[in-house]
Image (cartoon, rainbow, N blue to C red):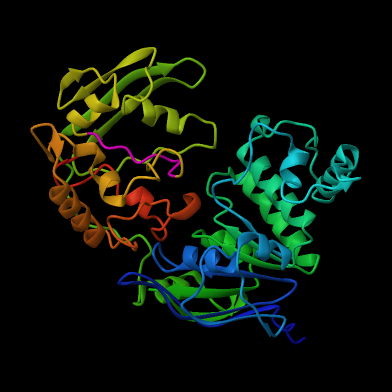
Amino acid sequence: MSSPQPILTLRGISKGFGGTRALVDAHMDLRPATVTALIGENGAGKSTLVKILTGIYQPDTGVIQLEGIPTRITSPAHARKLGISVIHQESVIFDDVSVAENIFVSAPPRRYGLIDWPRMRKCAATILEKLESTINPATTVRELSVAQKHLVQIARALSHDSRIVIMDEPTAALSHHETQDLLRIVRQLRDDGRAVLFISHKFDEIFAVADSYCVFRDGCAVATGLTARTSTEQLITQMVGRSVDQVYPTRAHLIGPEVLRVEKLSRNTEFADIDLTVNQGEILGIYGLVGAGRSEVMQALFGLTAPDTGRFMLDGTQVTIRTAKEAIRLRIAYVPEDRQRQGAILPLPIQDNIALASLHALSRSGFTSTSRARATAQHWIERLQIRTAGAGQPPGGALGWQSTEGGARQMAPDSPPSFDPR
């Protein structure tokens, strides 16, 4: 059986920010009743492409065709009008209003010019029922789990009768059970005839749900095909541009003396009796489902919250960590789970965000040296290969959207050369 004709076609799409080329002659097809996986490393251009498809950015060159007709997507509102919706990794949602209001936030049903509240709740209930959800449309969104908030965003896309649904890392903060439920909904969207663009770093999810794939590398589309005819090893090779014999190869390294010891760490209702040790040269993984207390333990280690009991030992000496400032002084760095709200101060320039943890080292007579802050930022932008419009630009860009590509927000803060975390 032949594949359906593309509903959306991209050809020769390029986008630059200053001297940085985020997309270079990129191409992609999205077809009805098909889940297409967009695959690539951080900085490959995936986020920039999504912003072009949703009207936030305009391409420098190239053509977008919707059902064969050249189309210029001028704004997010225009994208919705064209039937394009996006479900973000970080929920774009309003916590203090109801589920129904969130679903119809951009176009509530009206009667005689006023919002028709009974009809809104009834329509919301119908959409949620179609998604096999038991969420009450009158529930305040703040009471929902992360997975349920994603479901509300999907319901919002259905309220617009979207033909194209973009899912940008939707399972990043979900448990295994919640992920399986979301993948079920993705299949349901496909079976309803919608074109789904599914962005994920998790290959098990890609092979579980995607019909086709498109691999981006350095802003270019380097490979496309059917997922049934490829393998994880082939996709990784296409992502990184070289043969990878092992996804996680064993590296010879020496484990040094103990650096950190945590004993009987507890915080009421969050975690209890946590014991752990970390040695020099060692990576310790902490795993658990959403809500298990992983992030809360890390916040206590960094002085963001105060534990009820427990003690910290650094290099065999007991220390007290009551604030983030004390943690930084002890050369402890923290990269938060919620990079949108905790990982950066979006209105400030990138160079200021990078320098925040080391203002004392970059200051003279109480004033921060702008030239040293800029040099520090440039050092880490080059070392971590951060794609950005420039060190003087805000990481949030216009309207709070990030101007750094991919995972740059979580890579840059807390580690300039003047702050040497142990």
Q: What residue lies at 26% left-to-right and 37% top-to-bottom? A: 333
Residue 261 or residue 222, whichever sits in front: 222
Check residue 336 for magenta coloring.
Answer: yes
State whether residue 257 is above or below residue 192: above
Q: Is residue 195 left or right of residue 134?
A: left
Q: Where is residue 71 shown, x and y percent of the image?
A: 64, 78
**Horizontal and vertical percent position of residue 78:** 67, 65
How many callouts does the rendering have?
0
On the picture, is 389 further left or further right than 222?
Answer: left
Q: Is residue 398 visible?
A: yes
**Residue drawn 40% across the image and 45% down it:** 346
Tell me where residue 38 appears, x and y as whole percent. 54, 69
Q: Residue at x 46, y 73 (%)?
A: 216
Residue stretch in magenta: 332-339
Q: Work out whether residue 401 can be spotted.
A: no
User: Horizontally, is 129 left or right of 186 in the view?
Assistant: right
Assign the magenta stretch its main secondary structure: loop
Left or right of 313: which side holds 298? right
- The one nearer the camera, 223 or 228, is 223
Looking at the rendered image, the quarter that the N terminus falls into is bottom right
